[in-house]
Amino acid sequence: HVLVAGDAAGLADPWLREGISFALRSGELAARSAVAIAGSLRSSDVDSAEREYARALQAGLGAEMRAGERLARIFGAHPGWVHTALIALPPVWHRVDDYLAGRRTIPDIVDRPAVRPAITALTALSPEPS
């Protein structure tokens, strides 16, 4: 049985390419699962701990990566719009700054009621990466 974390698990921010926080957070999840596995007496407990690790990754870091993929897609298609939003709209920059400082996650930013319609519209105007 192997638990992978960080880069080995393919975990990094698709938009900004940041990976250290993903490595640390997935490493913590892997460590908790490893402790559960080490204390397991039955193979079903091992399987359960492995499934829980995968579920926790998908629920947390996976959600962040999916949101980051949307932003990367928008930025790739419309870098000028994104740059203008960052410099002309202080709330946009403050949210990105919160992300960079670790105070918010990308889903915290893009899943806000005031932001969601803009992200949905921009995503629809942005071609899928090839």
Image (cartoon, helix red, strand yellow):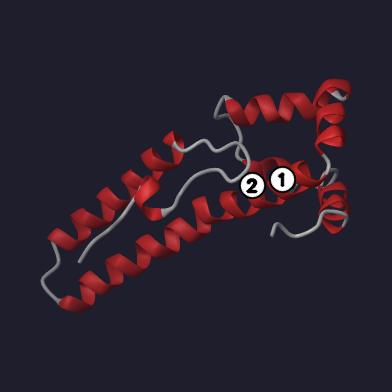
Question: At label 2, which amino acid type do we have?
Answer: Gly
Screen quadrant of the C terminus: bottom right
Q: Determine whether label 2 and label 1 are within 8 Å by CB.
A: yes
Screen quadrant of the N terminus: bottom left
At 22% from the left edge and 72% from the top edge, which residue is drawn? Answer: 45
Element type where label 1 sits in the image: helix
Q: Residue lying at the far left in this picture: please name it.
A: 41
Q: In which quarter of the image is residue 52?
A: bottom left
Q: Which of 85 and 59 lies nearest the eye of the viewer?
A: 85
Question: At label 1, which amino acid type do we have?
Answer: Leu
Which residue is denoted by mark 2 in the rendering? 68
Q: Which mark is residue 109?
A: none
At 71% from the left edge and 40% from the top edge, which residue is drawn? Answer: 109
Q: Label 2: how many residues lie within 10 Å, few (<14), some (14-19) or many (20+)?
A: many
| Residue 66, image x, y percentages | 62, 55
Q: Quadrant of residue 120?
A: bottom right
> Height in image: 75 above or below 42?
above
At 83% from the left edge and 21% from the top edge, which residue is drawn? Answer: 87
Q: Which of 22 and 37 lies nearest the eye of the viewer?
A: 22
Q: Is residue 33 left or right of residue 12?
A: left
Q: Is residue 5 left or right of residue 106?
A: left
Which residue is denoted by mark 1 in the rendering? 71
Q: Which of 86 and 30 lies nearest the eye of the viewer?
A: 86
| Residue 28, image x, y percentages | 32, 44
Question: How many numbered discs?
Answer: 2
| Residue 34, image x, y percentages | 21, 55
Q: In this view, does 21 lie to the left or right of 43?
A: right
| Residue 92, image x, y percentages | 79, 29
Q: Distance between the residues labelled 2 and 1?
A: 5 Å
> Height in image: 23 above or below 8?
above
Q: Label 1: how many residues lie within 10 Å, few (<14), some (14-19) or many (20+)?
A: many
Element type where label 2 sits in the image: helix
